[in-house]
Amino acid sequence: KLYASLAKEVGVQGPYISEDPRVEVQTFSSIDSDIVIVMNHSYDDLETALKSEHKIEGVDMLAGDANIKEFSNYAIKVHFPAKSSAVLLIRRVGELYPTASSS
C-alpha cells in the first residue's frame, strides 16, 4: 500500500491496481477499452481484486490461465494459479479520450 500511495501521489499510478502487491498490472488503453496484462509473481495461488479508476462495462479473458470470478463497477476479482498471468479486455463506460463529435 505504501508503494501504491507513493505512485498515486507522484502521478505514475495506472488506471488499474491490484490489491495484492505480488500481482503486477500493465495497461494499454484505447478510446473505450483497455488491454490489461496481469502477472502473479508469487509461488502461491491467490485471489485478488483489480481496482479501476474508471467504471467497468465488461471484461473478457483474452489469454492466460487465471479465472475471472466476478466484476463490479470499479473492481474485477481474479483467481491466479501460482506464477501465472492473464490478458484481459476491459470495456469502460464512456470514452477515455472524447472526440469533438462525442461531446
Image: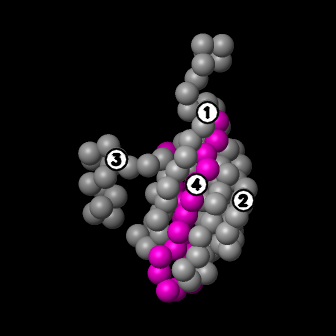
Circle nearer the N terminus (2, 1)? 1
Residue 72 numbered mark, or none: none
Please state which amino acid type lies under the numbered disc 3.
Val
Residue 73 in sight from this viewpoint: no
**Quadrant where the N terminus is found in the figure:** bottom left
Give neighbour class at mark 2: few <14, some 14-19, many 20+ (Cα, 10 Å): few
Distance between the alpha carbons at the discs numbered 1 and 4: 14 Å
Circle nearer the N terminus (1, 4)? 1
Residue 12 numbered mark, or none: 3
Magenta segment boundaries in residue numbering: 32-53
**Quadrant where the C terminus is found in the figure:** top right
Residue at which label 2 appears: 62
Residue at which label 4 appears: 36
Decide: is 43 above or below 7: below
Residue at which label 1 appears: 31
Circle nearer the N terminus (3, 4)? 3
Distance between the alpha carbons at the discs numbered 3 and 4: 16 Å
Distance between the alpha carbons at the discs numbered 3 and 2: 26 Å
Residue 88 in sight from this viewpoint: yes
Looking at the rendered structure, the secondary structure element under dot 3 is loop
Circle nearer the N terminus (3, 1)? 3
Q: Give residue 50's position: percent from left, percent from top.
A: 53, 60
Please state which amino acid type lies under the numbered disc 1.
Ile
Please state which amino acid type lies under the numbered disc 4.
Val
Q: Is residue 59 magenta?
A: no
Q: Give residue 60's position: percent from left, percent from top.
A: 73, 56
Identified at 68% across, 74% down, the residue is 65
**CB under 8 Å between discs 3 and 4:** no
Give neighbour class at mark 3: few <14, some 14-19, many 20+ (Cα, 10 Å): few
